[in-house]
C-alpha cells in the first residue's frame, strides 16, 4: 500500500525518471516516512489507550508492600504501561515510598518507564525489524528488574532524603474516565507526541537516505565494530549527557548503524540515552542523596554495558 | 472568591495550565485568586502524583494533563 503510493508520488506526481539514483532515494524516502508515521500513530494511540487503564495512583497500590524480585518484575512491567514523565519523577517517587513500595521496586519502575517507551519501539521496529524491537524491550525490562533488585539488596534507604519519610500524602481520588474521555486522551497524547517527534523522524530518514548513498558502509566498523572492546562503554558514557527522547537520537542511531557500528553497541547507546538522563538526575536530587544517585547511575550503566557486550557476542 | 491553584515543580506544562485556567476564568467573567504551588510538600498533601494539576478551592480537579479551555470552564462552574 505504502509502496504503491510512494511509486505514484515519485514517478507520476514528481515525474522523476525511473531507474535513476534520485528516483530510488526519493521513492525510499517517501515509503519509509509513510511507513514510520503510520506505525507511530497507530502504536502511540494503542499504548496511550492502554495507559488510561493505569495511573500512578493505581500502580502504587499494586506495588505497595510487594516482595522484592516479583515486585521488581511487576514494577518494570507497570513502568511500561503507566503514564509517566520525568517532570513528575519526584511526586511519583515520594508517593511510592510513602505507600510502602520497597526502594528497589521503586527504582525498577523509574528505570523501565523512560527506557521502554513506544517511540523507541516503533523506530527500532520500523528501521531494524521487529526482532530488534522485541530484543530492546526484553533486555530493557531485564536491566530495570536487575538494577532495581540490586539497589534493593544494598539496603540504601538511609540515602533517601529524610523528609521523604516524614511526608504525609493526601488521599487522592482516582477518577475513572469514560470511554470517550479515554479516546480523547489517547488522541491528544498521540497528537502531542507526533508534534514533538515528526521533524526528527523526517530528518533521520533523510539523513539515512543521503548517507546510505555516500559514506562508505564500514566507515565506523574499525572504531565501533564488534572487535573494539571500548566501544560499548564509550557509547554508554556518551549517552548520559545526551538527553533527548527516543526520537531525537534516531537520526544518530540510524547513521551509526548504517556505517558499521555493531547492534549491541547501538542498543546500549539507545538505552543509556533514554534511561540515564542528566535532567532527570537533577530532578531526583530533590529526593535522593548524591551518593544514591551515583550508585543508581553506576549500576544501570554496568547493566547496560553488560547487555551491549552480550549482544555483540551473540548477534 | 474562588481559589485556583496550579501544582507542579516549574515545568513548561504548569505554565501552560496556568495560562489556560486564567483564560477560562476570564471568559466566564469569574474573579479568582491564582496561586502557583511549587513546594513538593504541599503538592503531595493533595495526593497528586502527576503534575501539572489543577486545584479549585482545595479540590483536585485534574492531574497529569492539560485540559482544554472548554474543559477548564466546565470544572470552574
Image (cartoon, coloured by chain):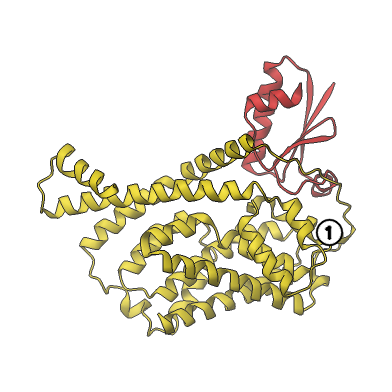
Residue wearing tag 1: A99
Q: Quadrant of residue B27?
A: top right
Q: Quadrant of residue B71?
A: top right
Given the image, what chain letter belongs to the residue carrying mark 1? A
Identify which residue is drawn at 63% across, 65% down. A111
* A146 on left or right of A9: right
Instruction: Spot the residue most to the front.
Output: A179
- Residue B3 in percent (x, y) is at 82, 27
* A296 on left or right of A243: right
Colour of chain A in the rendered structure image: yellow
Q: Is residue A239 visible?
A: no
- Residue A21 in percent (x, y) is at 14, 55
**How many numbered circles does the render carry?**
1
Identify which residue is drawn at 58% across, 36% down. A184
Q: Quadrant of the C terminus of chain A?
A: bottom left
Position above or below: A35 against B3: below
Q: Quadrant of residue A93?
A: bottom right
**Circle 1 SS class:** loop
- Residue B26 in percent (x, y) is at 69, 18
- Residue B51 in percent (x, y) is at 70, 44
Colour of chain B in the rendered structure image: red
Identify which residue is drawn at 68% across, 51% down. A54
Q: Is residue A131 visible?
A: yes
Task: Estimate how packed mark 1 is, as few (under 14), some (14 to 19) or many (20 or more) residues with alpha carbons within 10 Å.
Answer: some
Identify which residue is drawn at 62% across, 29% down. B68
* A252 on left or right of B48: left
The front one of A300 and A16 is A16
Amino acid at each position: 500500500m505504502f509502496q504503491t503510493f510512494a511509486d505514484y508520488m515519485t514517478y507520476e506526481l514528481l515525474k522523476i525518471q525511473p531507474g535513476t539514483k534520485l528516483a530510488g532515494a526519493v521513492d525510499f524516502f517517501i515509503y519509509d516516512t509513510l511507513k514510520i508515521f503510520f506505525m507511530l500513530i497507530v502504536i502511540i494511540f494503542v499504548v496511550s489507550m492502554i495507559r488510561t487503564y493505569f495511573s500512578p495512583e493505581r500502580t502504587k497500590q499494586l506495588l505497595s508492600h510487594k516482595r522484592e524480585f516479583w515486585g521488581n518484575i511487576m514494577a518494570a512491567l507497570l513502568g511500561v504501561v503507566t503514564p509517566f514523565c520525568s517532570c513528575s519523577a519526584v511526586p511519583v517517587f515520594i508517593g511510592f515510598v510513602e505507600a510502602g513500595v520497597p526502594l528497589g521496586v521503586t527504582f525498577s519502575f523509574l528505570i523501565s518507564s523512560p527506557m521502554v517507551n513506544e517511540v523507541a519501539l516503533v523506530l527500532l521496529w520500523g528501521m531494524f525489524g521487529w526482532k530488534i524491537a522485541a530484543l530492546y524491550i526484553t533486555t530493557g525490562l531485564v536491566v530495570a528488574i536487575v538494577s532495581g533488585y540490586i539497589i534493593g539488596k544494598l539496603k540504601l534507604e538511609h540515602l533517601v532524603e529524610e523528609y521523604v519519610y516524614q511526608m504525609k500524602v493526601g488521599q487522592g481520588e482516582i477518577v475513572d474516565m469514560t470511554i470517550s474521555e479515554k479516546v480523547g486522551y489517547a488522541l491528544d497524547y498521540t497528537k502531542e507526541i507526533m508534534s514533538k517527534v515528526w521533524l526528527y523522524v523526517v530528518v533521520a530518514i533523510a539523513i539515512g537516505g543521503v548517507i546510505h548513498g555516500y559514506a562508505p558502509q564500514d566507515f565506523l566498523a574499525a572504531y565501533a565494530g564488534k572487535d573494539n572492546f571500548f566501544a560499548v562503554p564509550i557509547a554508554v558514557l556518551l549517552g548520559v549527557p545526551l538527553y533527548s527522547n527516543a526520537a531525537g537520537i534516531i537520526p544518530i542511531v540510524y547513521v551509526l548503524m548504517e556505517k558499521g557500528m555493531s547492534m549491541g553497541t547501538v542498543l546500549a547507546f539507545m538505552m543509556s540515552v533514554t534511561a540515564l538522563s542528566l535532567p532527570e538526575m537533577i530532578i531526583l536530587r530533590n529526593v535522593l542523596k548524591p551518593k544514591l544517585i551515583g550508585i543508581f547511575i553506576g549500576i544501570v550503566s554496568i547493566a547496560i554495558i553488560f547487555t551491549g557486550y552480550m549482544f555483540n557476542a551473540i548477534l | 472568591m474562588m481559589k485556583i491553584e496550579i501544582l507542579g515543580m516549574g515545568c513548561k506544562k504548569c505554565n501552560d495550565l496556568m495560562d489556560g485556567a486564567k483564560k477560562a476564568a476570564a471568559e466566564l467573567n469569574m474573579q479568582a485568586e491564582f496561586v502557583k504551588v511549587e513546594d513538593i510538600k504541599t503538592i503531595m498533601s493533595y495526593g497528586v502524583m502527576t503534575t501539572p494539576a489543577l486545584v479549585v478551592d482545595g479540590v483536585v480537579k485534574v492531574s497529569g494533563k492539560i485540559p482544554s479551555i472548554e474543559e477548564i470552564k466546565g470544572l470552574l462552574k
